[in-house]
Amino acid sequence: MMSKKEIKKNRVPIAKQDPSVRVKNFNEVVLGYKPEQAVEEASRCLQCGDPKCVEGCPVGVDIPSFVKLLREGDFGGAIRKIKEKNSLPAICGRVCPQETQCEKYCVMGRRWEPISIGKLERFVADYERQQGVKVEQVASVKKGRVACVGSGPASLTCAADLAKMGYDVTIFEALHTPGGVLMYGIPEFRLPKKIVQEEVDYVKSLGVKVVCDVIIGKTLTIDELFNLGYDAVFIGSGAGLPKFLGIEGENLNGVYSANEFLIRANLMRSYKFPKYHTPIHVGKKVAVIGGGNVAMDAARVALRMGAEEVHVVYRRSESEMPARREEIENAKEEGVKFDFLVNPVKIVGDDWVRGLECIRMELGEPDESGRRRPIPIPNSNFILECDCVIVAIGQSPNPLIPKTTEGLKIGVHGNIIVDGDGRTSRRGVFAGGDISSGEATVIAAMAAGKKAAKAIDLYIEKGVGW
């Protein structure tokens, strides 16, 4: 352990594109550490005897060990240590909310700045990609066959872990490109498509097969998957049903769910029109309703798509916003305007959006989420001028499989009810990620996929579970 006088209290700064430049392109904003910077940051780690950071990692990465290997210059050893628990490190290093997970519990953070665990994870993952990812050896004799529905973080993790255990795994994806929300929901400037594709390729290198353009619940049912010889099915189809406000004017032209807006911009590459033939109307003034990471993504995409002014409309104060602080700061740097303690009551227009009628709010007592409840201030209505509205207030679990599969117990919010290891009420069927928990983080979905993989192994090998 370093002596106190040797401890570097502050993190090694990480380079980003200049806001005035990046707002005009879709290139990655955060540029990452150089090798000497990564080693310097890793050298701040105290190598605690009781590392709390590991407790904060949903997938249980041995953080002190990978950081120690990194600071010794063994970048290959560091990434191998991470991949013992995490099959998608380049993704997690970019989009995980480390500040509320592993870094929150870093002992350094009690007095100074915590170790930049996420940025270090990203560094070694990127280093491995640049050097060439080594294919892992998996068992040649297969224990059984498993179908994973969806190709988002839950299914990718479940499939990778099962493949390492010796299972023959096939992922079924409804869209024409695998990756799920990682590919269509997160903008290029925050998570490049190339990174997602290379992480998918790593999972495929383990022997996992990926079949696209198959909608489970329509093209094939869960029953038909069993008839095809699969021993178990994991459902990781996510939360793809957008929520709306239920206010007047939501059917006007120029109103999008954040889901539709981001899919058009990300997966269909509207920002490269006319090279890619999926244009999207943005307008000059855009109002984004919501306060989460998806709202930040939509606002920043709208700016890059040519909007002159973008407002984020949020009914609570900034301190209650669920978005990552980093994403809020990036949005502010790029010129996004924030209207706090404001709630939409009507979208104004004829055929097209002409404005957003809002009412001002004040905060009362905390609600069930622990945040102070917003209360309307009488006679405080005003019109926010805009010609495009993006609704980013969350998504519900994809309803297709619950509606087309008998024997699944469903919650009041349309989620598939599971036990702690992902077992559903139907024998041989497991679920995890947003389809069971509701909208959550990438790393939470991965944790669910890992738990389900262990439970599937027990079920197929020993019949444990029902």
Image (cartoon, rainbow, N blue to C red):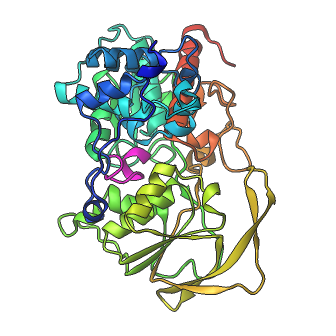
Is 16 positioned to the left or the right of 232 in the image?
left
Was residue 418 drawn as part of the magenta stretch in this picture?
A: no
| Total residue callouts | 0
Residue 221 in sight from this viewpoint: no
Nearer to the camera, 199 or 404: 199
**Principal SS element in the magenta part?**
loop
Q: Is residue 89 visible?
A: yes
Q: Position of residue 7 (x, y in %)?
A: 44, 23
What residue is shown at x 62% (from left), y 28% (from top)? 422
Left or right: where 134 falls relative to 308 = left
In this rendering, position of residue 451 left or right of residue 329 = right
Q: Determine the image quadrant of residue 300.
A: bottom left
In the rendered image, the quadrant that contains the C terminus is top right
Determine the residue positioned at 62% across, 48% down. Answer: 403
Is residue 184 found inside the magenta-colored segment of the image? yes
Q: Nearer the viewer, residue 171 or 86?
A: 86
Q: Residue furthest front?
A: 5
Q: Is residue 396 above or below residue 82?
A: below
Residue 80: x percent and y percent?
A: 34, 16
Q: Residue furthest right?
A: 365
Q: Magenta stretch: give its range.
A: 181-191
Res 344 quadrant in image: bottom right
Q: Position of residue 400 (x, y in %)?
A: 56, 50
Which residue is nearer to you in this view: 404 or 367? 367
Residue under the image location 73 percent in, 50 percent down: 369
Which residue lies at the image location 79% right of the left edge and 55% below the top edge?
Answer: 366
Q: Position of residue 201 (x, y in %)?
A: 28, 31
